[in-house]
Image: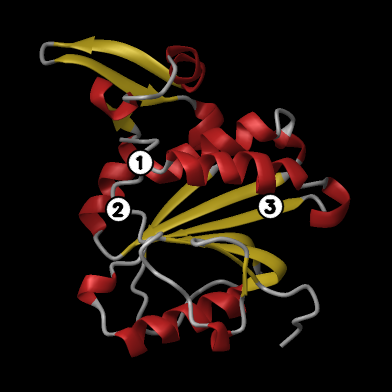
Amino acid sequence: MIFHRIETLKYLRDKVFSKYSRVRSKGKIRIWHVNCGAGDFSYAIAVMLREAQPKIDRFAVVITATDESSENIETARLALFIPKDFDDVPEQLRDKYFDEFKTPEGAVFNAKAELTKLLRFETMQLAGDWPFKEPFDLIVYDGDSADIEPAAEEEIISRLREQLKPGGILITDESYQIPSYIGFEAISDSVYARPEDDLF
């Protein structure tokens, strides 16, 4: 389902995206969705950004969504969904951002340009160098703690912190708690901030 983490999405809409301003962001909004899978939640992030900021096109917005699987990225770029992907999503919201068309197998929904133009899907391995030259306002980390050693995941989290602007937000899976010594301010169980005065 696209909106499978509804409380996280509401938090992003009401507490993060609604506070973006052209002055503070210098006209740019940079978001990174790490381990995006087939992209469902990436599209939900784009929906919430547009809902919170109806005039978002005044900003230079890039939502970079990466995954280690090229197959997942190919699927995400198609921007195609089926009706059950929208369980618990109001029809008005679905129809605002997705076009419905019929196929012999049933209804299919295609994300509209209002969403796809905000998103960039790329295959990327977390091991090794990362290509980003500018810091992010928000990082959403969909880690899989069951498949990674704790020390390796802590290294990833530390590197993600370095990719955030001071004051930037990191969203994790609710099952993962970031150790305090990594240097984040815990806002809630899955929401962390890089301190405003953290310049290194």
Q: Which mark is residue 37?
A: 2
Q: Are marks 1 and 2 in contact (CB under 8 Å)?
A: yes
Whole-Å distance between the Cαs marked 1 and 3?
Answer: 20 Å
Q: Which residue is mark 3?
A: 29
Residue at horizontal 36%, vertical 54%? 36
Q: Can the viewer see residue 82? A: no
Q: Position of residue 96 (x, y in %)?
A: 51, 17
Q: Is residue 115 left or right of residue 106?
A: right
> Quarter of the image containing the C terminus?
bottom right
Disc 3 residue type (three-letter): Ile
Residue at horizontal 50%, vertical 47%? 8
Q: Is residue 71 left or right of residue 20?
A: left
Whole-Å distance between the Cαs marked 1 and 2?
Answer: 8 Å
Total numbered labels placed on residues in the image: 3
Q: Position of residue 162 (x, y in %)?
A: 60, 80
Report crowding for label 3: few under 14, some 14 to 19, many 20 or more residues within 10 A (C-alpha). Answer: many
171 versus 92 height, above or below: below
Report crowding for label 1: few under 14, some 14 to 19, many 20 or more residues within 10 A (C-alpha). Answer: some
- In this view, the residue farthest toward the left is 105
Q: Which residue is mark 1?
A: 40
129 versus 43 height, above or below: below
Q: Nearer the viewer, residue 159 or 171?
A: 171
123 versus 110 height, above or below: below
Residue at horizontal 56%, vertical 71%? 132
Q: Which badge, 1 or 3, is on the more N-terminal residue?
A: 3
Disc 1 residue type (three-letter): Asp
Q: Position of residue 105 (x, y in %)?
A: 11, 16
The quadrant where residue 110 appears: top left
> Quarter of the image containing the N terminus?
top left
- In this view, the residue farthest toward the right is 23
Q: Are marks 1 and 3 in contact (CB under 8 Å)?
A: no
Mark 2 residue element:
loop
